[in-house]
Amino acid sequence: MLYDVAQADTSPAWCPGCGNFGILKAFDAVVEDNAINTRTLVLVSGIGQAAKLPHYPDKPVNVFNGLHGRALPAATGIKLANHDLTVVVTSGDGDMYGEGGNHFIHAARRNIGVKAFVHNNQVYGLTKGQASPTSEAGFTTKIQTHGVTSERFNPLALAICEDVSFVARSFSGDREHLKAMMSAALQYEGFCLLDILQPCVTFNRLNTAKWYKDRVKPVGDAHDPTDRAAALELAFTWGDEIPVGVIYTSERPSFESQQPALEARTLVGSFDR
Amino acid sequence: MLYDVAQADTSPAWCPGCGNFGILKAFDAVVEDNAINTRTLVLVSGIGQAAKLPHYPDKPVNVFNGLHGRALPAATGIKLANHDLTVVVTSGDGDMYGEGGNHFIHAARRNIGVKAFVHNNQVYGLTKGQASPTSEAGFTTKIQTHGVTSERFNPLALAICEDVSFVARSFSGDREHLKAMMSAALQYEGFCLLDILQPCVTFNRLNTAKWYKDRVKPVGDAHDPTDRAAALELAFTWGDEIPVGVIYTSERPSFESQQPALEARTLVGSFDR
Amino acid sequence: MDITIRVAGEAGQGVQTTGTLLAGVCGRLGLHVAATKSYMSRIRGGLNWFDVRLGEAPLCAGRDDADVLVALSEAALDVLGGGVRDGGVALYDGDEAPGAATGVNFTQIARDVAESKVMANTVATGAIFAVCGYDVEKLCDYLREQFADKGEDVAEKNVACARAGAERVGALRGALTGPKATGAPPALMTGAEAIGLAAATAGVKLAAAYPMTPGTGTFTTLASLADDYGIVVEQAEDEIAAVNMLCGATYGGVPAMASTSGGGFALMAEGLSLAGIMELPICIVVAQRPGPATGLPTRTGQQDLQFALRAGHGEFARAVYAPGTVAQCGELTRRALQTAHRFQTPALILTDQFLQDFQTNVDEPDRTYRPIDRCLADDAGKGYKRYAVTDSGVSPRAIPGGDAFVVVDSDSHTDAGKISEDLRGHVAQQDKRMRKAEALADEALAPEYYGPDDAERLLVCWGSTYGPCREAVDANNADRRRKPAAMLHFAQVWPLHVAAARDALGGPDEVYCVEGNQTAQFAALLRECGLLDACALISRYDGMPFTARYILEAM
Amino acid sequence: MDITIRVAGEAGQGVQTTGTLLAGVCGRLGLHVAATKSYMSRIRGGLNWFDVRLGEAPLCAGRDDADVLVALSEAALDVLGGGVRDGGVALYDGDEAPGAATGVNFTQIARDVAESKVMANTVATGAIFAVCGYDVEKLCDYLREQFADKGEDVAEKNVACARAGAERVGALRGALTGPKATGAPPALMTGAEAIGLAAATAGVKLAAAYPMTPGTGTFTTLASLADDYGIVVEQAEDEIAAVNMLCGATYGGVPAMASTSGGGFALMAEGLSLAGIMELPICIVVAQRPGPATGLPTRTGQQDLQFALRAGHGEFARAVYAPGTVAQCGELTRRALQTAHRFQTPALILTDQFLQDFQTNVDEPDRTYRPIDRCLADDAGKGYKRYAVTDSGVSPRAIPGGDAFVVVDSDSHTDAGKISEDLRGHVAQQDKRMRKAEALADEALAPEYYGPDDAERLLVCWGSTYGPCREAVDANNADRRRKPAAMLHFAQVWPLHVAAARDALGGPDEVYCVEGNQTAQFAALLRECGLLDACALISRYDGMPFTARYILEAM
Ligand SMILES: Cc1ncc(C[n+]2csc(CCOP(=O)(O)OP(=O)(O)O)c2C)c(N)n1
Ligand SMILES: Cc1ncc(C[n+]2csc(CCOP(=O)(O)OP(=O)(O)O)c2C)c(N)n1
Ligand code: SF4
Ligand code: SF4
Ligand SMILES: [Mg+2]
Ligand SMILES: [Mg+2]
């Protein structure tokens, strides 16, 4: 006797009030406003609550919803197969910085033309609330019963250190800002990291929407995103104020633009020669 | 018919003139000079030419020569099992920053009390000369036939960003400096990164002993290793001058010192209760 | 005589809380309880259910249909309503219930009585008690006890809710006759908890894992026991780190364990091979779920048997246990750890979502710390050779920090652990290690035969299908028109106890292999081991657990 | 009539250069060549040897003993001297040779003649030519050709070195009679190269791998062909990245390949499962070496068969090829890629150090680009469903960038690729995918039978043991006193061609399974498939390849 649970499998599978909705809406708006050709858009993700986003946009898109932690290498393969595609990774902090940490380092080193939108809720949502690499020190969970002691992973700093094309932070609760950051990321050629602060209403009672709202502060016009030291200073700023905006940009050419085999055409375009 | 090749299996398995010899000698001297108790010393490594070091010290030591890329988690397990042991990881740049990149991030985040001595020859030695994560842009090999295009991985910067206890750089060709750095690392409680520039005479014709010698420059007394911005500036300095010395130090407590289960005794000491 | 109460609704609606409360109180009352969980891979919404089956004798499986359905959502009623058996009762958390269900607005009642939405689960439990003809005051006593440390106010509000729930079922009070309490052990435990507790009492000192359903339950249990037993619990950055931490910790001298599921285990394959050549007693709990890849992350299956048997490159000895009951989860965890240490080689515990979440009565578990024997050589000193060649293949094992230097290597090595390319030495070490496989085989657990000696039909099974198969045997044999049947259950799937297996398999005419996979992996293993030629297959790979009925119908 | 010249010495002394030169010129002269490599896991020192076997008929294996030993180090003489057959010649790179060897100071001669130490290898080759009675001028012609682009000076210095070498063997000139040239194809190729070239011509567009001996040879070959064939070659940060890059690239529409060895393959197991559920045609070369773990990184073995068959969690279809010859390396690489694309599922090529490095004559390889059929649906558009349920299990496959939106998922999914927890849909998709396994089985390669129809002894083998087994059959049958023997070689080990296998295995009385592992993994597979009960085993797991003599002695 197999019950027909399909009808209860409603979509999206997110909790009411979750910050992921704001990210999805911003994304839909960016696609709409910029008249992005969704036929050449591929959304890539790993596994987690955030990683389900590719299934939910308003308009149909191409989707590669892969393994936990492995969105970036898959996205790299896709971009290399067809660099005419716009490849956007949209996944969680555990996915990208935990299981996927090594790929994060090396995607940044390559400066592969993939846009990584990381839903950073500072927790593992789908597996029910363990700490993530970005959880605050002291954050307690059923595994971290005495609180996290490890240093918060600083993805912005790493990406800046490896000189990727674009590093920004935004907040799921500020639609306009988030749209602006997504749109900006889509303009750059190389690797783009957009770390998005995203409240998890179910498992993160510390970094709530209010907590973020009280702290986010747009970087001023005075900030020069090509100044690495200044960018790093912002990347380290986390406390009463959390800077959001474009933190760093670089002119470093993308990985794919330096591949001899891709000069004339895409790999997929050259298959039949 | 099985030829008895054992007698030709001489030790160490390094090329004459290899920078690894300098590292081994410095290590032996540090053990000797500091009268280190080798019974409580464990050398941990992955796989590579550098990773063979644990088999070669003058004095017998405990050795865990594990999988390629996995020295750090193994070392973490050893340190947690018995935090009275001195746990030194001595392995290659490919091992620690390539295959092992994710563990590097997270060992740094934990600030686990393990000393990582990385033989950074900017190449994969044992597998015959492919680029490593620290190879220079433009470095050509049989795989990177048009030269490396990825950004050199900056291990110092990452370790500084994650606020580990101790970050230093040295050069296999300067015995005294290297000894001083190793000895200093052994004084710290938390995670210690000692990145050691090491000429590979066989596969790296670019970063030769002379190349390094011409560039290494000890950080001056003026440098304050607790100043993160200054430390990062040094971490980014790579060109005509390459700073060597203690780049960064931090007071952050070690991982093991924050574990309730380890307060009274070691895990191994509490087994029989 | 048994009944099943199914509490169903969206994730986040209190399905789990209600089910746990109900199971808990019934266990306390001395009823035999078997609780199973069916849930989706989401945190809110969807459709989850929690079945509490109550009986007068031990229960070891769930049922397909239910006697009472407590629907907290409309979807629950739509999807599961048809599964209420004739004469059963369906309650719906609302005033107007669709169809044949009865509306009892638990949420509203809780608001009215206690100004609290969350106490709806207490209201529901009260209602269930009433429908099954149980004395709601017994539930009230239990609630007072449970909420003792939350203050009298909370406790009394819950009591009031329970009473209100019981009252509001009106005419349905006593509609069913719940089984009588027969003095079942009051403590309940899940498979995941039994593994965790056994590991803690056996002396696991490092639990390193990366969260992965349905393995996480064991990891969480170990975390909850960490303070009591002095365990370091570390969430690794990935499964590769976890397995290598285990290798490091066991080298360092303490038993260490990880829990994971298929995908995470796949990432551990290289580390397993490391433990093989280094001869380290690591222990991994592989809680299966349907694949490939992410598959159905919250459902059950038995698809990773063959993978577990061969995972890791190169050839080395391993032991693979597959507990069938919650009690076996505990026993075999201890055994796995002890075996790993005796033979200095990895041991796997193969379980699955069904058994991890399966909750049933257990004899008051022995929580005393009684560490296994690590089988260490205490006289190792100068000239110590970690891999001395012995007849048994087991070399005296020392740990670092003592008089002996302990040298271990992932490369082929000398008997002293030094890296070596001596081909003859390589063979000597390989032979030494593989001799342990023989010894392991001598120690293999014999499969358990359940049923009459003259059974004509045999259900062969392994792991978590124990319960449903056993019940199928009972049901089959209760029906005189059916040929007598028996069960042969393997709680150890590698190495196999060949002699006992051959013996048991030789008898019956009709042999069925019951497995939660599509390719009949255990049957293939039996063929490979020369134990069975052809057999009939009863397989299930839709993500749901076997039930006795499913098996009976397939026989 | 064949002779073996063994060039041996420390890593870095020119063993490889000398061997390659010798093999190259002999191939060019129309001799049948079989070159094998034995080396240590180090860059300098130790003891490596390079065997060049020359014959008048095709050769498909190496030999244990040698006719000529060219020792560049004392250790080479010590260890390998005993392996020179009676009447053979041993040359030593020095003035005074220990024991029965003859000193010819190649290095000094090169210094004297050409002021270059490195040309010692040319001197040695000249000496070998003279000892074997070959005309050194033919070597000189070859050298001129080889060094044409290095300038006349270099060429002529080499010529002078070759002549000097030939001269200095003195009385040993013509001590042996080398086989005559019989018009063998002049081009030589290794297994690793054959795989790489076949992949490039078949349309592999992304080669992503992490270096690992003995897989690296294929990766390097692909890098050397990258410019000619328009391939992106990327050294991944680890094997997990490599396999996931392949998944991405194949999704994107181009064939993609990785090469690795056991440990790296272990890390790919999860990604393999991903390709299984996503139905992506990835292709992985698994070049075996002895494990467990790091084991003997530069030696050969066949220990990862069972692991390759089951790697990855969950159940999905795969094809596993195991070429036996250099020619098969090329053919089966193409076939693996085509099969993967026809059935949209991963294909593995199981090879090993012996075959990767084995170098022999091949018919002038076809270097024209002739891409496989990617089997894409060209009419996919609106409403496209990536996983449409079909009778064959194969769904029309589109790639992103066209009219159709292509949605793939590692979770259980609908026919449109959307994440879904519909259990019925899950079963429908699982059944659909597994139907491909049946189709794959229908396409399986029949094993190759070699030998007389009335053979009484059968050598069953797979993969790289083809050559030694075939030679063993010939040698056995050449001896009238021995019972006639035949070989049954499986170049595809999964799925098996059951009918053909059953047929061939039914005949002979004595069946031997010849395998480079300890646990008889292929024999186990045959038992599992019901193809073979008991059989004798001829196994080798000391890291060295089988030879005909080894097999004959064990029969
Ligand atoms: C190899 C592997 N390990 C573990 C898991 C289980 N898992 C699924 S999602 C997840 C963490 C999700 O956290 P995050 O990426 O932050 O996403 P969120 O749910 O918070 O959006 C884990 C551990 C898995 N699917 N695969
Ligand atoms: C899983 C795995 N992948 C690949 C290898 C092959 N391998 C051995 S050492 C090595 C790289 C060594 O480079 P590095 O760590 O820099 O050490 P070096 O030899 O340069 O000292 C590689 C790729 C391996 N042993 N295991
Ligand atoms: S668990 Fe957290 S992150 Fe996931 S959907 Fe719910 S609120 Fe959002
Ligand atoms: S290959 Fe390079 S790193 Fe390795 S031993 Fe030789 S010189 Fe040293
Ligand atoms: Mg998260
Ligand atoms: Mg290196």
Image: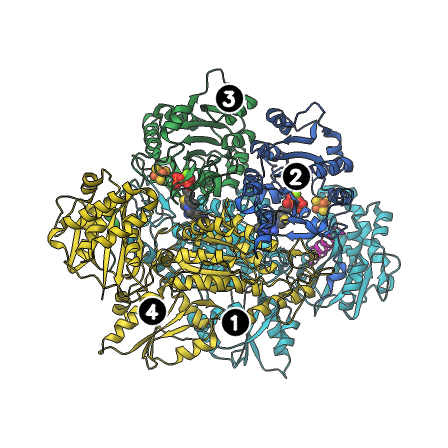
Chain colours: A green, B blue, C yellow, D cyan
Subunit bearing disc 1: C
The quadrant holding residue B197 is top right
- Which of label 2 and label 1 is nearer to you? 1
- Which residue type carries mark 1? Ala
- Which residue type carries mark 2? Gln
Q: Please state the horizontal and vertical placement of residue D474, each as a whole percent of the image.
A: 61, 74
Q: Please state the horizontal and vertical placement of residue D534, each as a whole percent of the image.
A: 50, 77
**How far apart in space, not on screen, are marks 4 and 2 (Cα)?**
57 Å
SS assignment at label 3: loop
Q: Residue at x 39, y 58 (%)?
A: C191
Subunit bearing disc 2: B
- Which residue position is annotated with label 4? C537
Per the rendered image, the range of residues in magenta is D12-26
**How far apart in space, not on screen, are marks 2 and 1 (Cα)?**
48 Å
- Which residue position is annotated with label 3? A225
Whether residue A46 can be seen here: no
- Which residue type carries mark 3? Pro
